[in-house]
Amino acid sequence: MLLINAGAVDGDGGAAGCDVGDWMAYDKQVREAGILVSGESLADLVTATTVRVGPDGRRTVTDGPFAETREILGGFYVIDVPDLDVALDWAARCPGARAGGSVVVRPVADFAG
């Protein structure tokens, strides 16, 4: 899974340093390579709300995804590739890795056995 974290948000609530054309081109490349399993862009990066439950069972609701970081999860791609090196190559091509953003590469857990 490629988890796309925006390093900054532009005036429209989108990832800074990437335009729609960049994302459309990357999406097309992933699809044409035949590796796309699924993927979604999350709604405006500034609309997130975080819920935490303390030891006493009370919940705390905070506007935004994380108070302690500026990175905001913007979306994800699940890709089917043979190994980590190929996944890292696709992550480096992702527009979300630019302009202070990052793409976290993690395997999806398989609990089936």
Image (cartoon, helix red, strand yellow):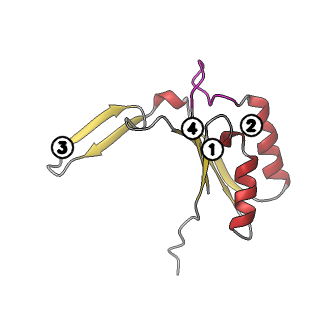
Q: CA distance from mark 2 to mark 3?
A: 40 Å
- In the rendered image, which quarter contains the N terminus? bottom right
Q: Residue furthest front?
A: 100
Q: CA distance from mark 3 to mark 1?
A: 31 Å
Mark found first going from the N terminus, 3 or 4: 4
**Is 68 covered by the magenta stretch?**
no
The circle drawn on residue 23 is 2
The circle drawn on residue 58 is 3
Residue type beneath disc 1: Glu
Q: Are marks 3 and 1 in contact (CB under 8 Å)?
A: no
Q: Residues in magenta?
A: 8-17
Q: CA distance from mark 2 to mark 1?
A: 12 Å
Q: Residue furthest left?
A: 56
Q: Which residue is mark 4?
A: 42
Q: Position of residue 71 (x, y in %)?
A: 51, 38
Q: Position of residue 82 (x, y in %)?
A: 74, 70
